[in-house]
Structures are given as C-alpha cells and as structure tokens.
Image (spheres, rainbow, N blue to C red):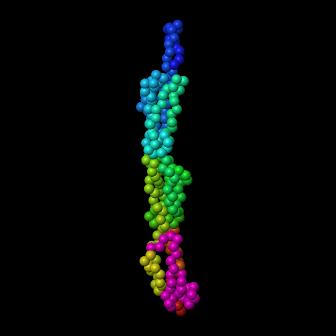
Amino acid sequence: YRLSKREDMQSNATCTPMSCGLPPALVHGSTLAKKKNVNYDTTLIKALNYSCNAGYSLNGRFGGATHQEITCQDNGAFSALQPCLPVSCGPPDAVGHSEASPALQEVFFPQELMYTCDIGYATDSKANGEKQFETKCTEEGDLTEPKDCLPVECGTIRTVENADYNKDKIWVYGEDAEIECLDGFSTDKTTALAAALFTRSCQSNGKWTNEEVECKRIE
C-alpha cells in the first residue's frame, strides 16, 4: 500500500493499494482478465489466470502445463509471467535419398520442412513424378508422415533379338542390366568375346543407355 491524499482534503491521508497497471500480454497465450488497471487488492481476491494457445506449453512439450497465475505484488509489479513455448516434435525424420530444408536439429510447432528427392528419385518412382513434399510439426507434438524417395523406374528392357537377359525384372535408376548375345551373334558382327556382351544402364530420367546396341549375326 501507499499513502495518498485527496486533492480536496490535503490534511487527510489514506492508504491505497499499489497499482500494477494493465494485465500484461502473453505471446502465444491469452487471459480472460479485463483490460483495466489491476491493483494489489484485486489479485488478493483473485489471481489473474493465463493459458497457452494450442501447440504451446510452459515447458515446450505436448501434455505439459498450459495454465498459470500471476498477481499484483506489493511493490507495484506483476509476478513473473512464464512464456508459452512452442511444442517440440523432436528431430526431423530421416528420409533416404533426399534433403530437408531448412536443416534443423529439432522441429517445433508450427514449423514445416520441405524435402527434395535426390536426382534419380521421386515419390512415385516416375521420372516426371513428384520430387518434393512437406512435413509439419502439429500442435500435438507429432510430425506428419513423410513420403519416400524411390528410385526412378526404367521398366523392363525393350526386346533385344538374339540375346539372353532378364526379361521380367523392373529395373530402376542406378541398376545395370547385362545382355549377352546368343551363339553366332555379337554387337559388331565379330567373334570377339567382348562383343558378345553389353550393358544397359537405367538413368535418372527413366531412359536406358545403349538402346541402339543390337546383337547381329557374325559374318
């Protein structure tokens, strides 16, 4: 309390409660307290209640305390108001063959991460498929499910006459298919052993190398 006098009665002094002013604002939180001056007597009767918004807590963890009270103290200042901290979703998910942006050690509500698949990878294995996707930290402290970056498919090998190779396999980026010419055939019509074999590689664009190479009858 402090000693104060009325202007019309200077000889009479009274003790009045210390004023702390308007209730302070809480970032990412709110209070039902009215926006009017608060004094020491006000919070003796009832403390000011604050609560954090969804996605925030007093310890930065989902399920942590979200409510707090403050009072107007006898020195004319409010008691300490704890900040509302964003809920942590933990470290970002590791997605193979991709890069996340921004590069974070820990993700907090409401942050989002953009993943970009490496060259030769897409979420649907198609050369012209989706190569970017997002995940975000929810108010419950969970990261939304990321997609996978899968190697681009080149499909099966186009028919090569007079040759032996795996005709059923679905080949993907980074894989090499060996094709062996049948007896009496080679890639250059000679009997050289090296000319009896050739390789087709599945590329990042979903196309094969050496598609023009064929097995021809040896002359």
Tell me where the magenta segment starts and ends, as one range.
170-198
Report whether residue 116 is seen.
Answer: no
Camera-side residue: 210 or 93?
93
Residue 98 against residue 154 in the figure, above or below: above
The x and y percentages for residue 161 are: 46, 84
The x and y percentages for residue 86 are: 49, 44
Residue 108 against residue 152 in the figure, above or below: above
Camera-side residue: 214 or 66?
66
Residue 193 is left or right of residue 47, and the answer is right
**Is residue 57 on the magenta stretch?**
no
The x and y percentages for residue 26 are: 49, 35
Residue in view at x 56 percent, y 90 percent: 191
Question: Residue extending furthest bottom?
Answer: 219
Residue in view at x 50 percent, y 86 percent: 181
Residue 6 against residue 200 in the figure, above or below: above
Residue 105 against residue 52 in the figure, above or below: below
Report whether residue 29 is seen.
Answer: yes
Number of marks in picture? 0
Residue in view at x 50 percent, y 90 percent: 183
The x and y percentages for residue 99 are: 53, 58
Camera-side residue: 125 or 215?
125
Residue in view at x 44 percent, y 44 percent: 63
**Is residue 177 on the magenta stretch?**
yes
